[in-house]
Amino acid sequence: MPDQRRPSRRATDERPTARAVSHLAVLGLLAVTVAVGVRATAEGSTSTGSQRAFPFGLIAVAQGADATALEEESVHFELVPEPEASPDLLPERGARAEVPEVTPLPTPVAPPPPPPAPAPKVVYVKPAPIVGTGQLKWPVPGGVITQYYSSYHKALDIAAPAGSKVIASDDGVVTWAGWKDNGGGLVIAIDHGNGIVTVYNHLGSLWVAAGATVTRGEGIAAVGCTGVCTGPHVHYEVIVGGAIVNPLRYL
């Protein structure tokens, strides 16, 4: 049988040269790397600049008989340091940072309520005085005189059926309307504003009240017989300037 180990031995004999070259290249690479690293360490410790070089060997080993080339490249990285703060801006050691004082805002105050509206001014106008004509009208329409004016009877007695109308002799204001204990019974007095006052006694009923304004000929009461009397009639008095006068002088 042929010897099978012969071809293998040939192939093995041809590779020692390539292996030697590869080993030499690796050893050379290690030597260069060590040398460069030592140099870089020395330069880094003494350098004051801002750049450091980091060499990296890029080696290509070609396998085979012709792989003898070795290439080396160096890649450089620049490290830029952060800007240093100015010493003037740094607080002193142990000094407390100043905190600005905060001025509190004033408490809002509600606006004052609006002043109340002024009350409307009331103007009182005094009514013009009511002044009669001075010419008196007969107080009991259809009535007849049963007793005339005299020194002991200062009035006219005018008789009429009970319930007959009694009228105001002139324009004026009622100053009295009610009962009198002097024997007059139900009495009405009217001020005519010209110094003349008329008084109506022994009335059966009253149709106006004190303070009422009456006009000439307006009905004010009914004929009666109240107080001291002997039959239905009106005891009619006329007062001028505070004195009782004969009514026939003004009727």
Image (cartoon, rainbow, N blue to C red):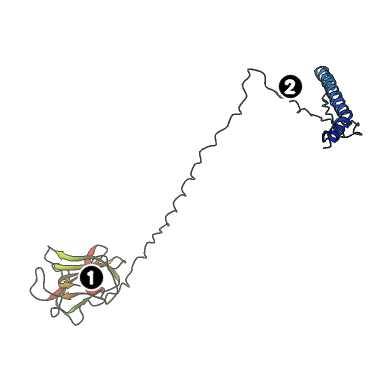
Farthest residue toward the front?
Answer: 1
Give the SS element for disc 2: helix
Q: Are marks 1 and 2 in contact (CB under 8 Å)?
A: no
**Amino acid bearing label 2:** Pro
Q: Which residue is mark 2?
A: 87
Residue 18, x across and y down, in percent: 88, 30
Q: Amino acid at mark 1?
A: Val
Q: Residues within 10 Å of mark 1 (few under 14, many from 20)?
A: some
Q: Residue 203 appears at what percent x and percent y? A: 15, 72
Nearer to us in this view, 115 or 6: 6
**Quarter of the view holding residue 250:** bottom left
| Sequence-first tag of 1 and 2 | 2
Q: Nearer the viewer, mark 1 or mark 2?
A: 2
Q: Nearer the viewer, residue 26 or 157?
A: 26
Q: Is residue 150 above or below residue 53?
A: below
Instruction: Give the spatial CA distance, label 1 vs label 2.
Output: 111 Å
The residue sitting at 82% across, 33% down in the picture is 5
Residue where numbered disc 1 is placed: 208
Q: Check the picture and name the quadrant holding the N terminus.
A: top right
Residue that protrudes farthest toward the left in the picture: 230
**Eyeballing the image, is 147 above or below 79?**
below
- Residue 47 badge: none
